[in-house]
Image (tube, rainbow, N blue to C red):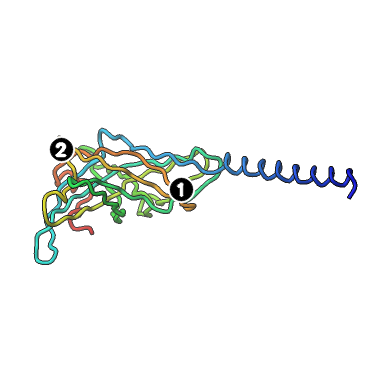
Amino acid sequence: MSILQEVLGLSALVLGIVNGLTLLHHYLKDKPRLVVETVHPDVYQWWFRLPSGEYNGRATRKYGFLAYVGVINRGLRKVSLGSWRLHINTLAGNKYGLRAINIPEPMSKLGDTGNMKLWPVLGTRGLFFPGETLVDSGTSISGMAYYIAEFWGGDTHNPRISSGRIAAQFVVEDAFGRKSSARIVFSEVPLGRAKSLIEDIDRIG
């Protein structure tokens, strides 16, 4: 093999590596980048006590969590959401991942006007909102998400509560398995307040 052939072969190899790195750079730069944010965190992030259940003949303790979150895509490619879970900590230091439970679209009356205010449910098609899970580049989706935690046995299995608040991690996973999260601090409200948005919330799940 002549020196010229060696140089040409080496040049082709270098060019192939450069092209591969360029494609990788564009792929990484263009990929979806989801950011999770709470919507009106001082108003809508609630937890409340639900009526007791039963497990193996023993009463359980049930807690409801109603989150209002937004998911923003700051990347250059659209992507679908695969799941959205809530992770809470117990007094014993254990972590529990909760799956979202289907709920009807929350609604409430606006004073004496007779008009209604409605909220979307994340990822769930309802009567008034499409419940999309596809987040296009530079856009966002938002909605309510509802979770139930149920415990039995010792009190150390209860959620960690501080001054009537429960801190949790809201984790979104996209269709490619990438995860994004946000910390949510839930404030305690009476069950009646949650029922003012979703009348049968204590019978769901």
Label 1 amino acid?
A: Arg
Q: Secondary structure at mark 1?
A: loop
Q: Is residue 42 left or right of residue 12?
A: left
Using the numbered discs, state the Cα–Cα distance from disc 1 to disc 2 in whole angstroms.
33 Å
Q: Residue at x 47, y 51 (%)?
A: 80
Residue to which mark 2 is pinned: 164
* Tag of residue 70: none
Q: Residue at x 33, y 37 (%)?
A: 39
* Tag of residue 178: 1
Circle 1 residues within 10 Å: few <14, some 14–19, many ≥20: few
Count the marks: how many?
2
Q: Closer to the N terminus: mark 1 or mark 2?
A: 2
- Toward the left, the furthest residue is 58
Q: Is residue 134 left or right of residue 189?
A: right
Quadrant for residue 114, please give it. top left
Label 2 amino acid?
A: Gly
Quadrant, the C terminus: bottom left
Q: Residue at x 30, y 45 (%)?
A: 118
Quadrant for residue 57, please give it. bottom left
Q: Secondary structure at mark 2?
A: loop
- Toward the top, the furthest residue is 42
**Residue 10 location (% of width, % of height):** 79, 44
**Residue 159 location (% of width, % of height):** 19, 46
Q: Residue at x 31, y 54 (%)?
A: 99
**Residue 54 location (% of width, % of height):** 12, 62
Circle 2 residues within 10 Å: few <14, some 14–19, many ≥20: few
